[in-house]
Image (spheres, coloured by chain):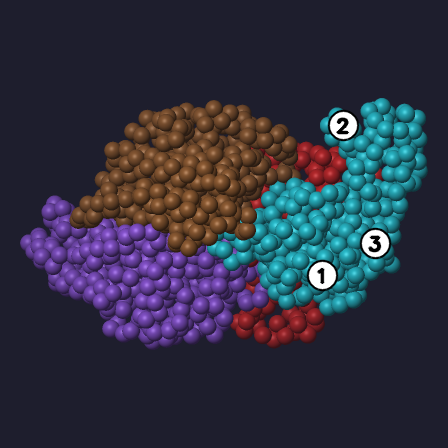
Chain colours: A red, B cyan, C purple, D brown
Amino acid sequence: MNFSSDNASGVAPQIMAALAAANEGHAMAYGADPITKAAEAAFTDLFGRELAVFPVATGTAANALALSALTPPWGQIYCHRNAHIEEDEAGAPELFSGGAKLALLDGDGGKIEPETLATAIAGAGFGVQHHSQPSALSLTQATEAGTIYDLDEIAALSGIAHNAGLSVHMDGARFANAVAHLGCSPAAATWQAGVDVLSFGATKNGAMAAEAVVFFDPDMAEDFLYRRKRGGHLFSKMRYLSAQLVAYLQDDLWLENARHANACAQTLSQGLAALDGAHLVHPVQANEIFVTLPERVLNALKTASVGFHSWGNEGLSRFVCAFNTDAADVERTLKIAQAAI
Amino acid sequence: MNFSSDNASGVAPQIMAALAAANEGHAMAYGADPITKAAEAAFTDLFGRELAVFPVATGTAANALALSALTPPWGQIYCHRNAHIEEDEAGAPELFSGGAKLALLDGDGGKIEPETLATAIAGAGFGVQHHSQPSALSLTQATEAGTIYDLDEIAALSGIAHNAGLSVHMDGARFANAVAHLGCSPAAATWQAGVDVLSFGATKNGAMAAEAVVFFDPDMAEDFLYRRKRGGHLFSKMRYLSAQLVAYLQDDLWLENARHANACAQTLSQGLAALDGAHLVHPVQANEIFVTLPERVLNALKTASVGFHSWGNEGLSRFVCAFNTDAADVERTLKIAQAAI
Amino acid sequence: MNFSSDNASGVAPQIMAALAAANEGHAMAYGADPITKAAEAAFTDLFGRELAVFPVATGTAANALALSALTPPWGQIYCHRNAHIEEDEAGAPELFSGGAKLALLDGDGGKIEPETLATAIAGAGFGVQHHSQPSALSLTQATEAGTIYDLDEIAALSGIAHNAGLSVHMDGARFANAVAHLGCSPAAATWQAGVDVLSFGATKNGAMAAEAVVFFDPDMAEDFLYRRKRGGHLFSKMRYLSAQLVAYLQDDLWLENARHANACAQTLSQGLAALDGAHLVHPVQANEIFVTLPERVLNALKTASVGFHSWGNEGLSRFVCAFNTDAADVERTLKIAQAAI
Amino acid sequence: MNFSSDNASGVAPQIMAALAAANEGHAMAYGADPITKAAEAAFTDLFGRELAVFPVATGTAANALALSALTPPWGQIYCHRNAHIEEDEAGAPELFSGGAKLALLDGDGGKIEPETLATAIAGAGFGVQHHSQPSALSLTQATEAGTIYDLDEIAALSGIAHNAGLSVHMDGARFANAVAHLGCSPAAATWQAGVDVLSFGATKNGAMAAEAVVFFDPDMAEDFLYRRKRGGHLFSKMRYLSAQLVAYLQDDLWLENARHANACAQTLSQGLAALDGAHLVHPVQANEIFVTLPERVLNALKTASVGFHSWGNEGLSRFVCAFNTDAADVERTLKIAQAAI
């Protein structure tokens, strides 16, 4: 029973099978192979438009490289105060951008509100040589709090950014969970709502190590080949990166995996929330649950070796469901918790 | 029949099996898993000493991150004019080091001679604020020309570097081929000859995407965790990177693979060299053959769809053998070539 | 009547005379001249201890270069949200540090409170590879709000920083104004209170373009020659930079200039504060006055071409006094303001 | 008698007077002052065309900032192996460009030959993601060897660069000496021959610390304000930087100073070359003399405390004449040398 992280889950069998299948004969290196072409075609189909897509192996690489294409070194990138790019990438955006600044915005439930963004931009000092220049907005979808921007919110934020000349990046490490929740097309959730560049995550949702940087305007990707290579993120045996992505998109595996994780999170969160003294910190919309639990519940779960993350002494805890979370584990966990009340 | 690149070869079955075997249950993310511990232990055993080892997925990442730990931004790194770090990494060492300079040294057969290094260092201007400061030496083993430094050469070059206060890096993208040729221990080929940090390659020799940065002095690796993470090179599902390395070292797979590739290259190069009008450009010591071939031979091979790299109109060509090169393919290729004379 | 900025003031006659006097014959370039030696000796005397001092020409250069010596690229530097290094240097600290992060702290009157710093450090995640690592604290003295840290406050903040392994930088663009207010020795205001590196400003207080980066521990300055040079901040005709600093320190010119500016600011602020409807936003402790003024006063001052900075429509205004502010101008300005009530 | 460096010379009296004259009253900071406007107009007049000009204080700043506007971080800049940007700026171009590479070209007398450049560009691998991408050519005029490109040479080199999509930078630390020698207009020596950006030097030729970065296509300077500021190279009291440049251009002071220095170098070099056993290493075209001298001459000059630079034991020496070199000193020096033969 492990709800510690979707990074602790393994690789989906369909993706494992695709890797084995890709291991036939020789293939041109560095992306000049048929599987990589197939991955590119699959993304074009998925988003229903011309685009430029670049496989990489980690979410931090996807984010930092994508952002580096949207900002000069003296730029600033607006993001939520708790965004992964600020808190969990050890300065990767600063490295790849050559020293751009992350401008941190507050917001409940991990979400930036349009007015907050508008106010920040209004005070930024465009064209004033002393100030870092606003260059991009980065939205996390699903957010670090397990919540999800709806389409109107994305459109409103993107509109403010574009009106001020900024580009819009979406950190979609859990993009599948967001689309599964929204029930819309991937196109509606991104470029149709104003997103320019997407970090399309697969690793947390069943891939081994595969993400895709998707530029909806290929002109913005003009230099990206060089950025990826000099970051050490160009794979020589690219077919194995691409094979993961092809399998991930095939037959809606990405959505099926995410729907399962989201559904498990619903069951688990509703069960936990019903406990006396428990309290959901954020609405549960994706596969992450932030909840405060009574100490006896925490103790009972730990005693039973249920894996989850717990902070400090106020009972704040995180449970993450994954593509392969066992529904029986959810039930067992809830029983242990209920028995402890 | 494909001799275009060892990057075009696939993944060794033992490594594929290890990946499948690693896909059991949950595992702590970011390297806190048992397979990563096992990889660390395997490297300690292999080199017979305390060390610090960091798995990454590409050779460029391994080299650029390793070098960044050895040089300040105003440093200069001595390397051969044709080194991969200079010619084929699109400026990755400059990115990760914050702008250090590669100082290019000439040398026949892809090798730097001790006197060349000594002369360069003598003229460098240590302590003069106007000049970039010598900080490291990077040796490629096997070299880009398919040759191999012998132990005395490594020791002589390392000695000069150390005497001047420089650290020594070895780009071992084809380290296995070098050790297979030298017939010595990995320890003798590295730290016992003065190497401080090794980019230990596996990808070209049968892994999917796995290299290891090995610091023989763990103190030099103090900051490496941060360097790797902010480069986007820390894998969340690290077990799959580590599993490749464990399998690669197990039962001397790395050496067996390299011996096979080297042996194929010997057979192929001797056969080619015996052709009238053919000429080996460099001694063949690892798995790469640089040879000039008569035009009719080139044409015959191309007509037969033999894969290899060919430059310009003087017949200069490169054939690379891999862990999975079929001995029958070597024979067939030689027959085609011989028939064209 | 100009209170717009101390940067709009000219050069003190003593410094102008020193420049003319320095213009005799040849002098070794790049700092190997007697005037630079004299400047170094003057700083050693001033602070009463061994130190390493480096003249540069701008405050941004002094700050960004100094900070770069205190942080790795994956470090974070704590500073006040309104610090010059964050708001008015267009990302210079990020450039020179190779991408370190400024971590912004709130605080009334431009000052960081010890508890705020302690809380931030406690939550920083030392040693966690995903997080930027706390590396330095930067205090602005006098602050951007025209207030001044007292010695106990500096000691408390430095103590927290040092206990956590951070270095302490002081942005002393208006250090003279601070010392003039505190009435203590420069030593007491810096190293005796825990400051490791000081950006000692002269430009705003009567120099033409001269600042000094002062390392109280010379070991921390080991690499600084290279940092300064590769930033393009090493002057070939260094004697003219050093001559400004020598004259600035001679006969307490720096303190005399600052005392005059502070005294003018006291007179002006007390006069303005006494106006009906006026309100001092921050205590006036140095040479800057932040005040809200009734609209009729603002209009009267503008009509009379009094130079000052004014924001938005709530009457928030800034008046800055300089080393050469004319006391009669202060009187005239107050009369105009009083007449408008 | 000091021929060690033009950096050892002082400030021209006209420039000193201009600084004193600029020290009147208040002036808007950061370049919004009338003297800076006058400097801009003076450059427009001098070059006879629309342009964008930015004063900075050091040659290294001028070069590194200018180049940063011409290259992406994965770019490469062609320059002579002995160029100041390679040998004497401690990596400043790498810092400001974010890690671009200097590609070093050989050439006699400090000059790049068109064929050398063409060959290098032909082998660069445009569009290949593994390779740094050619982005700029930097020419030094006068060269580090004291020689001067003639107009046809500049045009030929610029043509090759432009045809390949590269921009052309000129390091004109001794631009005045070059124009004085060429006897052409500044326009003919730069934009009419294909130069896109010029580092226009004044410091070595009588200014205190003033250079100008001149963009002949203002569109290329779009971001330069931010580059200069975040490099710490924006002066608050800009008027004093601009005043030097205005005086330098007024009444052809820049050319007069250079003509004097060049003429002194002619006299001195011809006298030295006539000595038995002496040999001019390069043609003397500007104000620098590279000469090998018999040991007894070297000894006699040193005994007489004549200042000059001397390398090793083969008698290679450098003499530099400046705007204020005393003709009598030249005569005295020659007499000492002649007496030693």
In front: D241, or A308?
Answer: D241
Distance of label 3 from label 1 (alpha carbons): 16 Å
Q: Residue at x 64, y 67 (%)?
A: B219
Q: Amino acid at mark 1?
A: Gly
| Residue in the image at 25% along x and 65% along y | C250
Ranked by sequence position, the earlier of labels 1 and 2 is 1
Q: Which residue is mark 1?
A: B194
Instruction: Assign a secondary structure to mark 3.
Output: helix
Viewer can see residue D247: yes
Q: Which residue is mark 2?
A: B314
Whole-percent x, y for residue A275 in the image: 59, 68
Q: Percent from the top left, x then y, of residue D111?
A: 52, 34
Q: Which residue is mark 3?
A: B182
Q: Mark 2 or 3 closer to N-term? A: 3
Viewer-closest of A18 and A272: A18
Above or below, comparing residue D188 to residue A236 in the picture: above
Distance from Cα at disc 1 to Cα at disc 2: 39 Å
Chain letter of disc 2? Answer: B
Amino acid under disc 3: Leu
Label 1 chain ID: B
Give coordinates of residue C91: x percent, y percent: 42, 51
What is the CA distance from the residue labelled 2 to the residue labelled 3?
A: 32 Å
Quarter of the image where one finds residue B182 = bottom right
SS state under label 2: loop
> Is circle 1 on the same chain as circle 2?
yes
**Residue at mark 3: chain:** B
Which quadrant of the figure has residue D189?
Answer: top left
Q: Amino acid at mark 2?
A: Glu
Q: Residue at x 64, y 62 (%)?
A: B163
